[in-house]
Image: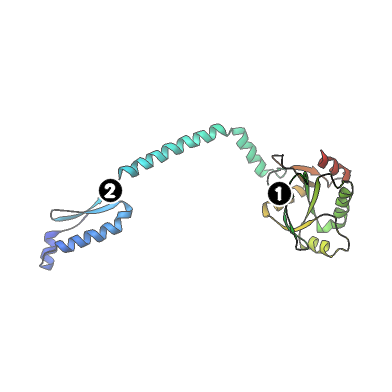
Amino acid sequence: MELGTGEQLSAARGRDTRPFRTGLTLVLNLCLGAAGFRVGVVPGKVRLVRIVHAETLIGVVLTCVLGYYGWSLVKTIWPSDQRSGMARSSSDPSATLGFRVEGGVAVNGDLVFHVPPPRIKTTVVFMLRGASLRADVAFWRGVRSRLSNDAGVRLVGYCDGDACANLVRGAAQSTGFPVIAFGEIVNSESLINADTQGKCILLREEWREPKHVVWRAAGNTPQSVVTEALQ
């Protein structure tokens, strides 16, 4: 792109324009250098020249080549049936992915932390619904009463909202297990999904994925949960 000629500038101003052209060249190079351009001065003319650095070109080519082979490798080591299985899990409400470790703020304001082995082998987390809180607490008290102190099983309840938390907080009798009012969002959503199917979640550190066990169903008793937790 031609910006002008030295002769035209001299005629217009009536003086030597070489200092002007030198300054203009410097300013334009500073402004346009980041975009890969430079301004060049040839006899009598100022021209805008596009620069393609060899290093830049090589970098672009290598990036494209490595990206292609990287994607090919991913498709090779991640079989299609595994990819489709993960897609099903993400849309399947019965998927066990999501909940990893219990913890949060209890209804009384205390912090509830994960208790690792060997003291605790299995943690059972479950939802307490405000609408059926009395029956829910009675069920899990029944589970707790059937577990010995050295069984290595921990029960942790999660409230489904403020109504549940207020009722547990104001109850005269302790539940016998911690009840979380505020938990980590991913864990809480996973537990809500499980509870819509009437399930609790069993966690054990040697398991790759948590285990879901039905407890909100006719015929299910506290003993059925104890049996699953002790297996």
Give the residue number, with chain letter if any, for mark 2. 51
Q: Which three-letter amino acid code belongs to the residue tagged 1?
A: Val
Residue at image position (81%, 46%) is 153
Nearer the observer, 137 or 178? 178
Q: Residues within 10 Å of mark 2 (few under 14, many from 20)?
A: few
Residue at image position (67%, 54%) is 185
Residue 153 visible in this rendered orientation of the protein: yes
Residue at image position (88%, 53%) is 138
Residue at image position (68%, 44%) is 97
Nearer the observer, 46 or 73? 73
Task: Identify the mark nearer the N-term, 1 or 2.
Answer: 2
Q: Which three-letter amino acid code belongs to the residue tagged 2?
A: Ile
Q: Residues within 10 Å of mark 1 (few under 14, many from 20)?
A: some
Nearer the observer, 19 or 81? 19
Relative horizontal placement of residue 22, taking residue 199 as reference (left or right) = left
Where is residue 19? Give x, y as percent.
16, 63
Question: Residue lying furthest front in this view?
Answer: 118
How far is the residue under mark 1 from the one under mark 2? Answer: 56 Å
Give the residue number, with chain letter if any, for mark 1. 101
Where is residue 187? Give x, y as percent.
70, 51
Relative horizontal placement of residue 32, taking residue 197 as reference (left or right) = left
